[in-house]
Amino acid sequence: MSDIKLRDFLELPYEQIEELNLESKRQRMERVAPDQIREQRAKYLTDERRIKAVTVLFSDLEGRLHTLDYDKKFLLSSLDNLTFDGSSIRGFTEIAQSDLILEIDWSSFYWLPSDFFGPGKVVVFGTVLNRDRSPFASDFRARLHNFSEELLKRDGVKMIASAEIEGFLFKGREAERRYHETDRFDLISIGGYFHSLPQDPLRQFIDAAAEVQRAMAFGNEKDHPEVGPSQFEMNFGPAEATIAADQIQLYKLICRQVAHRFDMTASFLPKPITGINGNGMHTNVSLSKGGKNIFYDAKGRDRLSEGAWNMIGRLLNNADDLCLVANASVNAYRRLDPNYEAPNEIKASPVDRSSMIRVPHGNERSARIEVRSVGPDSNPYMWLYTVLRVGLEGPEPTADEDKRPRTRILPDNINAALRSFKRSPFMKEILGEVPHAKYAMLKKASADRCPRLLGKLIKRGEILYHHEVTNQMLWATF
């Protein structure tokens, strides 16, 4: 009797998972009709008896990823009425207007490695709607997607993006939420860039997480320990804006899940430890038209086109106003420290890594701009949406502003960034009045829970009240 297998849930080899996800990604990039993809996925879920649940993902206004597991049979029978309580999500709805609707984005369907995510599950992203099925203004994934599609339809232009996301690996599970017990993090490794052995714990984590990424069709490029001890970075290829932002969210989810299985914590706090390098999310951006990279000009300055330099000019001109989107927490401003290779200068350079924007050496395929002043805890959908809107439509510098005698510096604390964000009419215009006000309110609430003068040492509040760390119990102890 003990030898009887009671359950037979879906568990696929990594190679087969990669093939399925690559085909799904191809359909997404080729814009196969949504009704056709929905029909295919619904039939697959119906026929594949070994799938028990579908995990639906969405992100809140601050960029924190949320997951809902729907029983497969229930989901298929209730596709037009998948509701959830929006008042339980920070920055979404008030309790008197709590119900919101999730609409499945079938093009974003992923198969998961069962050894880390459990057998019998697949994952898909959802679009948040109001009760009348109108777009929910604070769902920046939908807003990024919709604006990208409008840009493609109107001008034939696609935004291509990728992110270099750094993180730290700490001993023990839930290390961030338990920070108040010791006021410190325990590193897994004290080695740094190129100094980790092939099978030390940091490398084992990187290898395992990279395998999951590969299976999920990320297009892996390279992975390695970073400059700081116990710090890592795993790079993957560029993609259209919404896919790139989805992959950022999945990257952090994968890293956290793999670390959890190893009794560790993968942390994407921008500056978790005093005295060593912080975590960044360098964002590479280019524009494509008709399959051609229109940021490239062999005769242009640093081999970039005039259009690319126009985008750089707008991003630099509005750097103060968009800083709060790029650096979304109290802790993020500790990273903007020039003593630790931090990009805090509002300028562009092909070589100077203290510049907010770097111009990597590129060719017709790889020409791009790299925005370096971004923390890994930013909302990737809001961030890429903001880069696209500001880069294409933002106020340009005047002739007088172009003659400024000295390099400007990014805000060095969240309160200064918040002031610039709140008084910016263009940020209010592109984000929308309600999301703009809600986002400012959430950032102020976090700032008010930390000392205004932070000093040199990391303070407990920066960790415990961080939007990717805090929970209701911690928030209520203030």
Image (cartoon, helix red, strand yellow):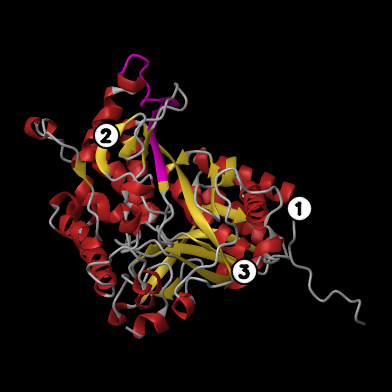
Does 39 appear above or below 240? below
Q: Quadrant of residue 53?
A: bottom right
- What span is colored magenta in the figure? 282-300
* CA neighbours of label 2 inside 10 A, class few (<14), some (14 to 19), many (20+): many
**Secondary element at image label 1:** loop
**Secondary element at image label 2:** helix
Residue bearing mark 1:
13
Q: Residue at x 45, y 26 (%)?
A: 291
Left or right placement of residue 42 versus residue 30 in this view:
right
Q: Residue at x 69, y 66 (%)?
A: 120
Q: Residue at x 46, y 71 (%)?
A: 81
Where residue 167 sits: x, y (%)?
50, 55
Where residue 169 sits: x, y (%)?
55, 60
Residue bearing mark 2:
311
> Label 3 is placed on what type of residue?
Lys
Q: Quadrant of residue 292?
A: top left
Q: Is residue 283 magenta?
A: yes
Left or right placement of residue 83 versus residue 443 in this view:
right
Where residue 110 sits: x, y (%)?
59, 54
**Secondary element at image label 3:** helix
Q: Which of pointers 2 and 3 indicates the residue nearer the eye?
A: 2
> Label 2 is placed on what type of residue?
Met
Residue bearing mark 3:
72
> Label 1 is placed on what type of residue?
Pro
Q: Which of pointers 1 and 3 indicates the residue nearer the eye?
A: 1
